[in-house]
Image (tube, grey):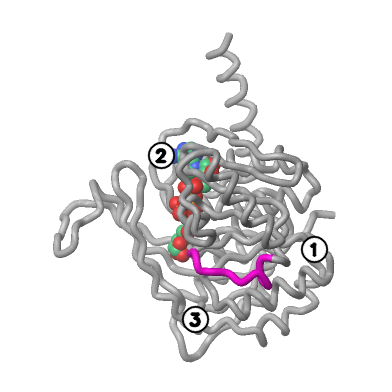
Amino acid sequence: MKSKVVVVGSYNTDLTIKTERIPRPGETIIGGVFSEGGGGKGANQAVAAARAGANVSFIARVGNDALGNLGVQRLTDEGINTNFIYKDNDSATGVAFIVVDERGENSIVVASGANAKLSSADIDEAHDEISSADVLLVQLESPIDAIYSAIRKAHSKGAMVILNPAPAQSLSSKILNDIDVITPNKVEAEMITGIKASDEESLRAIAQKFFESGVKIVIITLGSKGMFVGSTEGMKLIPAYKVCPVDSTGAGDIFSGALAAFLAEGISMEIAVKMAAASASISVTRLGAQRSAPNRKEIEDFLMNYSSSQAEVIG
Ligand code: ATP
Ligand code: RIB
């Protein structure tokens, strides 16, 4: 039987323009290519986990509108259980306006809409679903009370809890104490711990601070520089795969979603991190968030081809 990942989080419709550069305040840039696609940190992670091979349930809130219906359809088409995506009559489906420049860097503004209405009562309704998870994966793009309710339920049932703390906000030790794996990017790690991540020593200090709050494994994603992984067994930097970036939107989401799928399967932390990094690095070579997530075969093929191409370089 496939291992089960439950994701609690946001769904947004992403409206993206890929253009030469991100405009300055007051500036209008003419020229660019528009695309629409599924987004939202929670939904991106759910899609990445499903494509990586997990049985996924997604708990979220969308508007009772055309974009919400489209979102539910998209996730259903991925084989994700959408029974706990609630439709809100008073708020619109979340929308993100995204500008991507020619280096693949982005700038994003989000109107959360129905995402901001996800409540602890919604989480209670999904009690049985969360209780049967091997892994619970959450982010911070939804109200913290709802996220914390889900964390408590999963933790009390012995599921592994993964927190991707994005967008960053300060977190109480009550929350951190129930987290098994945290996956901040560099900026989020700095904002949550108050320690500047300037070198390997400071990354160690950040990991140490998370350990002191009760987190067991710390994975700080560093974009094209890779990942810093810390656990009680040791700490190390794992380099990223070299790829040609087109759009980094959702790279962190694809990483966390794939990681959840691989850890739920029982794959070791080091291998799971490398496979999740492969998944994220493939995604940055493609435009969009959900649509850029690779499937399991693409991840395995990438890893095989990458190691043989590296062997050629070394040999
Ligand atoms: P985003 O906010 O763009 O969704 P993030 O800031 O949360 O992403 P990053 O640290 O940028 O997350 O990226 C997550 C992972 O994706 C990295 O650890 C790395 O494995 C992979 N990745 C991101 N950018 C690149 C890149 N340019 N080249 C190769 N791998 C990348
Ligand atoms: O992490 C990327 C996501 O952030 C986008 O899909 C956008 O919807 C925002 O939530």
Density class for disc 2 (Cα within 10 Å; few <14, some 14-19, many ≥20) is: some
Residue at 71% of width from left, 46% of height from top? 231
Assess mark 2: CB under 8 A from ligand 1? yes
Q: What residue is at 72 percent from the left and 47 percent from the top?
A: 262
Magenta segment range? 167-176
Q: Earlier in the sequence, mark 1 or mark 3?
A: 3
Amino acid type at image mark 3: Ala
Classify mark 1: residues with Cα within 10 Å, few (<14), some (14-19) or many (20+). many
Q: Front-most of 247 and 252? A: 252
Residue 92 location, quadrant: bottom left
Secondary structure of the residue carrying tag 3 is helix
The residue at which mark 1 appears reads as 159
Which amino acid, mark 2?
Pro
- Mark 3 burial class by Cα count in 10 Å: few <14, some 14-19, many 20+: many
Q: Is residue 291 visible?
A: no
Q: Nearer the viewer, residue 77 or 22?
A: 22
Is 77 magenta? The answer is no
Q: Which residue is mark 2?
A: 245
Q: Which residue is mark 3?
A: 114
Q: Earlier in the sequence, mark 2 or mark 3?
A: 3
SS state under label 1: loop
Q: Is residue 218 above or below residue 302?
A: below
Q: Quadrant of the C terminus?
A: top right
C-alpha span from label 2 to label 1: 35 Å
Q: Which x, y percent locates residue 194?
A: 49, 59
